[in-house]
Amino acid sequence: MRSGYHPTDDFNGALQLGVGRFQLTQRSGARCSAAPAYLYPARERTNLQVFTDALVLQLLLEGRRTTAVSIHRYGQTETLFAEREIILAAGAYGSPQILMLSGIGPVLTN
């Protein structure tokens, strides 16, 4: 191209430098994160509870099955029991940390 930039069809490919259309996480011209895309539409479901200002301490297990989550919020430790399932989605750093705090993961030896 005359501007010195070349067309790029895949910004996730080997070469990101260039011009072209790229993927956006937008809805109606505004950024659309996971909250408005998935959480807000599901807020009214009776089988969903959202807790804010909470720190997950560990997952509680019965055998190999997670049955509850221990959290700390508002200065107290609470145990939240699940009837069916628990979904751990604490990111690339938080999820492994919570699993290790719960005794799940590699055995570390000196």
Image: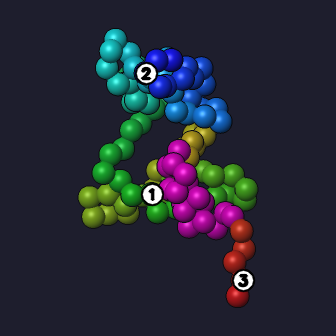
Residue at which label 1 appears: 56
Q: Nearer the viewer, residue 98 or 71?
A: 98
Label 3 neighbour load within 10 Å: few <14, some 14-19, many 20+: few
Sequence-wise, which precedes: disc 1 or disc 2? 2
Q: Farthest left residue?
A: 74
Residue at image coords 67%, 57%: 62
* Percent position of residue 85, x then y: 60, 40
Q: Is residue 68 visible?
A: no
Residue at which label 3 appears: 109
Q: Is residue 33 above or below residue 29?
A: below
Q: Farthest bottom residue?
A: 110
Label 2 neighbour load within 10 Å: few <14, some 14-19, many 20+: few
Residue at image coords 32%, 15%: 29
Residue at which label 2 appears: 3
Disc 3 residue type (three-letter): Thr
* Percent position of residue 108, x then y: 69, 78
Q: CA distance from mark 2 to mark 3?
A: 58 Å
* Percent position of residue 30, x then y: 31, 20
Question: Which stretch did the figure color magenta?
Answer: 89-105
Sequence-wise, which precedes: disc 2 or disc 3? 2
Q: Nearer the viewer, residue 15 or 55?
A: 15
Disc 2 residue type (three-letter): Ser
Q: Is residue 88 magenta?
A: no
Q: CA distance from mark 1 to mark 2?
A: 52 Å
Residue at image coords 60%, 34%: 15
Helix, strand or loop at label 2? It is: loop
